[in-house]
Amino acid sequence: MKIIKIFAVSILVLSLFCAGSLWAFDSASDFSLTATSGKTVTMSYFRGVKPVLLFFWTTWCPYCVRQMKMLNEKYEKMSAEGIEVIPINVGESEEKVLRFLSRNRISIPSFLDGYGTVADTYRLIGVPTYTLVDREGRILFQTNEFPYKEYKSLLTAVPGK
C-alpha cells in the first residue's frame, strides 16, 4: 500500500512539472519567424543568452486580446528584467494582424505563424498559450494563463538559470 501511495504522489508531482502537452525541461524547438515589422527571430538565437516567453495568440480569441493588451503594458518591464517576449499570431494574415495591432494600439512586435507550423511543433491545443523557456533552451512550462507574479521565481528555481 505504501508503494502505491509513493507512486501516486510521484505521478502527481510529475504532472505538476508537465508543461501542457509538452514535458517540462524538453528542449525548445528552433524556428524562424518574421514580425509584422519585418524583423526575423529564431529561437536558437536566445539559447545561452536569455529566457524567452512565447505567447501564441489569435485576433478572434477574446482572452488572447486581453492578454495581448496586458503583455503590451508589461513588455518593457519584462524586457528590462531580461525576458524576451515573443508574441506569435497563429494562422492569420499579416493584414489582419496589422489591423488588429493598430486598432488596439499594441506596439509590441508580433510574429506571424501563418500556417501554424511553429504552433504544431510546440503541440498547441488552443490559444492563448504561453510557453516559458529558460536561457538554456529548456521548456519550463506551457499553459493558457501566465503567472505574472511567479514567472521570475520560476526562472530562478530551475537549474541552468
Image (tube, rainbow, N blue to C red):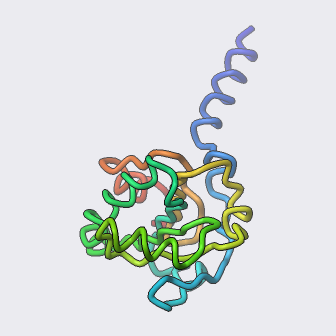
Look at 42% across and 49% down and name the residue there. Answer: 146
Q: Position of residue 4 (x, y in %)?
A: 75, 15
Q: Nearer the viewer, residue 99 or 114?
A: 99
Q: How many marks?
A: 0
Look at 51% across and 72% down and name the residue there. Answer: 96
Q: Position of residue 33 (x, y in %)?
A: 60, 82
Q: Is 113 drawn above or below residue 35 in the view shown?
A: above
Quarter occupied by residue 139: bottom right
Q: Nearer the viewer, residue 123 or 50?
A: 123
- In the picture, measured across the screen, residue 108 lies left or right of residue 14, that is left
Q: Nearer the viewer, residue 80 or 85?
A: 85
Q: What quarter of the picture does the N terminus occupy?
A: top right
Q: Is 38 drawn above or below residue 117 in the view shown?
A: below
Q: Is 20 drawn above or below residue 54 in the view shown?
A: above
Q: Nearer the viewer, residue 114 or 158?
A: 114
Q: Position of residue 61 (x, y in %)?
A: 50, 51
Q: What quarter of the picture does the C terminus occupy?
A: bottom left
- In the picture, measured across the screen, residue 144 lies left or right of residue 21, that is left
Look at 52% across and 78% down and name the residue there. Answer: 95
- In the picture, measured across the screen, residue 51 lies left or right of residue 42, that is left
Q: Position of residue 98 (x, y in %)?
A: 45, 77
Look at 70% across and 12% down and name the residue there. Answer: 2
